[in-house]
Image: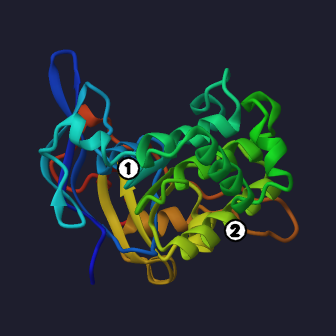
C-alpha cells in the first residue's frame, strides 16, 4: 500500500510549569489516498493534538518528542516553519471545529476563499474569485454568487462549515484534516455535511483524517479507524472489523456505551466508570487498567 501520510512511533509533549508532559505516546497510523480515516476517543484523549501534529501545526508549547511523520515519504518532523508554509493550504488543509471563529468576520466569503488560490497558485483577483464561486457551487450552495458576497455572520452554521470546506479544498490539497467539523450542527445539517465530505473525498481522491467523538459518524463515513485513549492507540483497523469484533477492553466498553433503543421502562445509559488518568499521573502498565472491567 502506498500511504500518503504515515505516523511512525509519534510522541507529543506539552510544556507546563517548566517541565515536558507526555500527551500522545508512540502512535502509529497510516492514511492512503482516497481513504477517510476516523480518529475517535473521549475528550482529552489527544485526538486534536495528534491531528495537528500530522500537519506540523502544534502550539508553541508543544513538541514532537519522538517518531517520524512521513508525507509522501518525506519526513515532516525536522522541517522548518517556512518549509511547512509551502505545504499548508496547498498540500495539507484543515477544516477546524469552529468555522465562525476561523473565518474572518470583516471579509466576504468569496474573497476569503479566493485568497487561498491567489496565494498558492498566483491567480489574478478576478480569476481567483471565479474559482471561489465555482468551489462554493461544488460544496452545494444553491446560489454561490450570492453566498460569495456575504460575510460569515450572514450564513447559517451549516453554510459556514461548507464555506470552510470550500476554502480547504480549493487549492486541491492531498491531505484534508477535519477536526470535529459537525460538532455544533443540528442532525439534519450534520447529515448533509457528512454526505458532502464523502462525495468530495471520493471525487478528489485526497486522503482525509476525520476527528470525532461520534462513533456513529465514523461508521457512516470512514474506511478505517484509530481509537485513542489517554494519548495511546487502543485499536486500529477497518471500521467494520473494529466495530463488530473489538478486541481491546476499552474499545469494547466504548462501543457498549453507545445509546440503543429500549423497550418499556427507561434504563440508565451504560457508561465507563472512572476517569482517564491525568498526563502527569500515567500508570506504568496499561493506561486503561484503572477503569478496565477485566482488570
Which label number is shown at residue 195? 2
Residue 284, how many percent across, how many down?
15, 48
In the image, what residue occupies the spot 75% across and 29% down? Answer: 151
Quarter of the view holding residue 2: bottom left
Inspect this view and state whether residue 199 appears: yes
Which of these two is toward me, 11 or 269? 11
Q: Earlier in the sequence, mark 2 or mark 1?
A: 1
Calculate the distance from the C-alpha at mark 2 to the C-alpha at mark 1: 22 Å
Which of these two is toward me, 293 or 140? 140
For residue 10, side relative to residue 149 (left or right): left
Dot 2 lies on which element? helix
Q: Which residue is mark 1?
A: 51
In the image, what residue occupies the spot 44% across and 44% down? Answer: 122
The answer to whether the residues at label 2 and label 1 have Cβ atoms under 8 Å apart is no
In the image, what residue occupies the spot 60% across and 48% down? Answer: 127
Residue 107, how many percent across, how many down?
66, 26
Please say if 230 is above or below 81. below
Inspect this view and state whether residue 98 appears: no
Please say if 138 is above or below 127. below
Amino acid at each position: 500500500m502506498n500511504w500518503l501520510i504515515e505516523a511512525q512511533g509519534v510522541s507529543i509533549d506539552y510544556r507546563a510549569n517548566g517541565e515536558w508532559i507526555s500527551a500522545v505516546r508512540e502512535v502509529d497510523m497510516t492514511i492512503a489516498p482516497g481513504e477517510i480515516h476516523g480518529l475517535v476517543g473521549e475528550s482529552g484523549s489527544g485526538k486534536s493534538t495528534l491531528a495537528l501534529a500530522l500537519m506540523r501545526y502544534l502550539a508553541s508549547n508543544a513538541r514532537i518528542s519522538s517518531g517520524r511523520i512521513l508525507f509522501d515519504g518525506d519526513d515532516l518532523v525536522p522541517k522548518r516553519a517556512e518549509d511547512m508554509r509551502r505545504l499548508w493550504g496547498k498540500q495539507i488543509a484543515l477544516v477546524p471545529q469552529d468555522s465562525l471563529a476561523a473565518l474572518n468576520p470583516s471579509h466576504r466569503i468569496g474573497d476569503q476563499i479566493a485568497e487561498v488560490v491567489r496565494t498558492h497558485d498566483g491567480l489574478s483577483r478576478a480569476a481567483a474569485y471565479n474559482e471561489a464561486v465555482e468551489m462554493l457551487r461544488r460544496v452545494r450552495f444553491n446560489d454561490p454568487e450570492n453566498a460569495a458576497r456575504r460575510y460569515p455572520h450572514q450564513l447559517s452554521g451549516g453554510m459556514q462549515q461548507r464555506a470552510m470546506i470550500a476554502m480547504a479544498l480549493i487549492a486541491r490539497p492531498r491531505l484534508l484534516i477535519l477536526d470535529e467539523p459537525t460538532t455544533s450542527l443540528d442532525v439534519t445539517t450534520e447529515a448533509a455535511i457528512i454526505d458532502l465530505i464523502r462525495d468530495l473525498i471520493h471525487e478528489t481522491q485526497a486522503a482525509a483524517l476525520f476527528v470525532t467523538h461520534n462513533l456513529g459518524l465514523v461508521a457512516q463515513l470512514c474506511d478505517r479507524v484509530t481509537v485513542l485513549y489517554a494519548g495511546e492507540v487502543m485499536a486500529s483497523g477497518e471500521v467494520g472489523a473494529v466495530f463488530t469484533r473489538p478486541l481491546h477492553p476499552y474499545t469494547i466498553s466504548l462501543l457498549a456505551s453507545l445509546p440503543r433503543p429500549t423497550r418499556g421502562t427507561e434504563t440508565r445509559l451504560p457508561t465507563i466508570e472512572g476517569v482517564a488518568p491525568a498526563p502527569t499521573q500515567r500508570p506504568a502498565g496499561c493506561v486503561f487498567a484503572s477503569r478496565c472491567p477485566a482488570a
